[in-house]
Amino acid sequence: MPAPILVTGVAGFVGHATAHRLLDRGERVIGVDIVNDYYDVALKEARLATFADREGFDFHRIDIADAGAMAALVRDHGVTRVVHLAAQAGVRYSIDNPFAYEHSNLAGHLSVMEACRHASGFQHLVYASSSSVYGERPMGDAGFSEDEAADDPVSLYAATKRACELMSQSYARLYRFPQTGLRFFTVYGPWGRPDMAYFTFSRKIMAGEPIEVFGEGRMARDFTYIDDIVDGIIGALDHPPAPGGHRVLNIGDSHPVGLMEMIETLERAIGREAIKVMRPMQPGDVTATFADVSRLHALTGYQPKVMLAEGLARFADWYHDFYRTGARS
């Protein structure tokens, strides 16, 4: 029987969806999460509850920065593939809570790599980086390329994600185990994160409350639907680099959308107009993100399928069911 795949951050948005997809194709999955209170713990617990009847799923409530616990978990279960998605997320949160990023993103990433390098027959570590590593730059016509410099982060969150990439580059060369870093571009969809703009906007629009539009609506994001993101994660997992190889790949939709257009699309999905309050750009934010996904496509055939209007409509339906009809546990 194939060894189980370890998914860190399994109570999180992307980890939850990735673990379910792996289970759907017959993999065994070990899920790890500390289930912290950065956002609604009840939502995280509800995500975990969806695994209750899934055969082949084993959950461990562990802090990824606990190097001993992570090493024992990987060793004792014979793990040879890891999808490392656990991290302290959020650009603005890092302004006031810097040490949360040092603990989860730096110490946590090192802990996971240490567990992997000591594992027998280890095959591939896929980990989450971020489009935020590109910093502030013109959007251009072709998207942000992995060849572009990523040495001017505008937030601590971005700096920790870039640091993780450099740590992985070092470990891949030193210890000869393959690694792939995925630079995520604005993931959205059902079961999403409440700190994301589309989620916050939905709650306020449905409640008839004003929404704050930062950057005075001039920002643009490469909104990428969760199912497409999972396609890319698993595609990358199935195509490891050679021993000692490390690469970073963009994973996004490659069709950036202006913030005002996103709001208009969300209004149509909800069936209600937003009350908008324009605000200046916030510290740590960047004006635009735009993914060049040609390398991921060449490697895996990755091709985003869900357009923003369809994806936000699916999210709005889920939101209504989860928060308005008692589905929330």
Image (cartoon, rainbow, N blue to C red):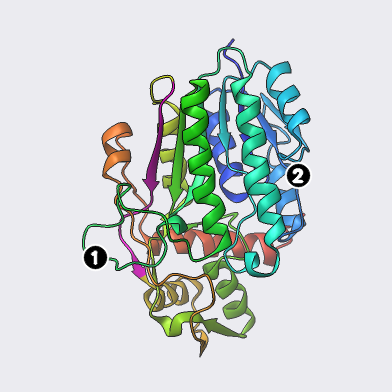
Residue 219 belongs to magenta span? no
Which amino acid type is shown beneath numbered disc 1? Gly
- Per the rendering, the mark at residue 34 is 2
Numbered label tally: 2
Residue 291 image offset from top left, x and y in percent: 33, 54
Q: Position of residue 64 (x, y in %)?
A: 71, 39
Range drawn in magenta:
244-257
Q: Is residue 111 above or below residue 189?
A: above
Q: Classify mark 2: helix, strand or loop.
A: loop
Image quadrant in which you'd find residue 110: top right
Q: Residue furthest left?
A: 141
Up the image or down, 223 lies above or below 182; here it is below
* Residue density around tag 1, few if under 14, some if 14–19, many if 20 or more, within 10 Å: few
Write the residue at 67% across / 52% down. Answer: 102
* Label 2 packing within 10 angstroms: few (<14), some (14-19), many (20+): some
Residue at (56%, 83%) from the top-left corner? 211
C-alpha distance separating marks 1 and 2: 39 Å
Q: Secondary structure at mark 1?
A: loop
Q: Is residue 251 magenta?
A: yes
Q: Quick check: 274 above or below 89?
A: below
Residue, x 48% and y 42% (percent of image)?
165
- Amino acid carrying label 2: it is Ile
Q: Left or right: 58 with respect to 19?
A: right
Q: Closer to us: mark 1 or mark 2?
A: 1
- Quadrant the N terminus occupies: top right
Quarter of the image containing the C terminus?
A: bottom right
Is 211 left, or right, of 104 in this rendering? left
The numbered mark, 1 or 2, whose residue comes first in the sequence reads: 2
Q: Position of residue 205 (x, y in %)?
A: 57, 79
Give the number of the disc on residue 140: 1
Residue 295 in the figure: left or right of residue 13: left
